[in-house]
Image: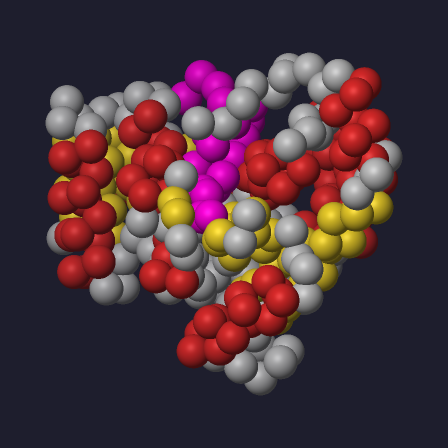
Amino acid sequence: MNAPLNTPVNAQTHSQASAHSYLVGLIGSGIGGSLSPAMHEEEGSRLGLHYVYRRIDLEALKLDISALPDLLLAAERMGFNGLNITYPCKQAVIPLLDELSDDARALGAVNTVLFKNGKRIGHNTDWSGFARAFQRGLPDVSLARVVQLGAGGAGAAVAHAALSMGAQALTLFDVDAARAALLAAELQQRFPSRTVNAGSSLAESLAAANGLIHATPTGMAKLPGLPLPADLLHRDLWVADIVYFPIRTELLRAAEALGCRTLSGGGMAVYQAVDAMRIFTELEPDAERVYTHFQSLLPHTED
């Protein structure tokens, strides 16, 4: 499990870490707008590190997911300390790893790979990042009946987070119905006291729901649009999106227009980055400092 945010960093540990350079990166598709490099490099500098973070964009390189084994090997050979992994590689990367953290194994998804002692070790900081962001942004909403769109790698993480935070009934929808059913079965086994299922009617499920979690790529700058018909939203819903570029997606704009309480993907981006940095450096980033820096970057990313 992740260390608490207030874990102390003693002077000797900090001095030892400061003597090292860190080279990390992000593998994904269409990640040109990612703020991870800026967040990691700024906080690395604040921690006294030589910290370089590079995007490895499948789309920009005109590659597809089949290039993932070669990219991991290349990063390993070039001395990367680790990699963040994002869409569409969070599940495909697992067979390429030597070890998995308990969280990553349970979730079946990896967003952080540490290269250490000749091994590739997979972690998942998405679920903890989402949970901390949710508790900060929507601390008092009802989790009695929650609908989630998306059952992929990120979806698995945020569904786990929702149930960990106390969601009583969680209904999953995905363009791949079988994937939603499989994730629902896994979560039901992991959380036997809750009700988890794959939904059949989005309209009926949302009409009875307290909240909606959106965990698909729809709404990203490269995939604009709404992930569902806008008329299915209602003002009694809270709406949480994991997309953060743009920070106010079309889904959030539509929900806010109805008076819904909303949560952007920004907090999840910050807290998963903080947890990943801890894994890469064994130091404790200042989460509030990273959050403030992230906020300062947003005006430059808004349309």
Q: Residue at x 29, y 40 (%)?
A: 106
Q: Residue at x 27, y 64 (%)?
A: 175
Question: How many numbered circles are shown?
Answer: 0
Quadrant position of the N terminus in the picture: top left
- The answer to which image quadrant residue 5 occupies is top right
Front residue (pair 221, 251): 221
Can the viewer see residue 155 in this picture?
A: no
* x then y, percent, for residue 227: 40, 58
Quadrant position of the C terminus in the picture: bottom right
Residue lying furthest bottom? 62
Can the viewer see residue 283 in this picture?
A: yes
Q: Is residue 231 left or right of residue 285?
A: left
Extent of the magenta region: 121-141
Q: Is residue 186 left or right of residue 295?
A: left
* x then y, percent, for residue 117: 55, 48
* x then y, percent, for residue 69: 46, 71
- The answer to which image quadrant residue 162 occupies is top left
Front residue (pair 283, 303): 283
Q: How is the image coloured?
A: secondary structure
Q: Residue at x 58, y 37 (%)?
A: 279
Q: Residue at x 51, y 57 (%)?
A: 86
Residue lying furthest front? 117
Q: Is residue 138 magenta?
A: yes
- The answer to which image quadrant residue 58 occupies is bottom right
Q: Is residue 140 magenta?
A: yes
Front residue (pair 55, 217): 55
* x then y, percent, for residue 78: 68, 66
Whether residue 7 is situated above or below residue 183 in the rendered picture: above
